[in-house]
Image: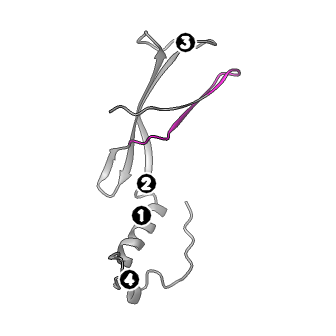
Amino acid sequence: RVLLVGSKDICANKIYDNNNNKGYNNRDICKAMYTWTFNQRGVIRATSMRHHKVGEEEAPYMYTEGDDITFEIQLEELTMKGWTPYTTNDMQLEYTMLDPHIRSFLIPNK
């Protein structure tokens, strides 16, 4: 990750303690920037992953064209409070076996 900042004074003490008119202070902005840059938050990891044919429980040695597949994954995001469950509505799965090439949206559990 790379962070580009337009001013060397962005986290200076004189600016750091000032509040702007929207109620945000520079301390929160600087903390959000450096924690993201140094991978202290905003990191996503997979903790569990499972796939199998629809109607079966075990993953086969290989899939063939026309097989309907169930894919399940549990994701966690690193936040300032530690690892927390991560949910999103726009994650995609891409499955490639020479040919065919499948790209599909993942549907979160409710």
Q: Which residue corresponds to mark 4?
A: 16
Q: What's the distance in space between the residues labelled 2 and 3, CA to CA?
A: 35 Å
Q: Nearer the viewer, mark 4 or mark 3?
A: 4
Q: Residue at x 38, y 43 (%)?
A: 86
86 sits to left or right of 10: left
Q: Position of residue 19 (x, y in %)?
A: 34, 82
Q: Position of residue 53 (x, y in %)?
A: 49, 13
Task: Label 2, secondary structure: give it.
Answer: loop
Q: Which residue is mark 2?
A: 42
Q: CA distance from mark 2 to mark 1?
A: 8 Å
Any mark on residue 21, and which? none
What is the spatial separation of the Cα atoms under label 1 and label 4, in whole angstroms? Answer: 16 Å
Image quarter for residue 39? Answer: bottom left
Instruction: Give the extent of the magenta segment.
Output: 87-102
Q: Is residue 95 magenta?
A: yes
- Type of the residue with mark 4: Tyr
Q: Is residue 100 magenta?
A: yes
Of the 4 image quadrants, the one containing the C terminus is top left
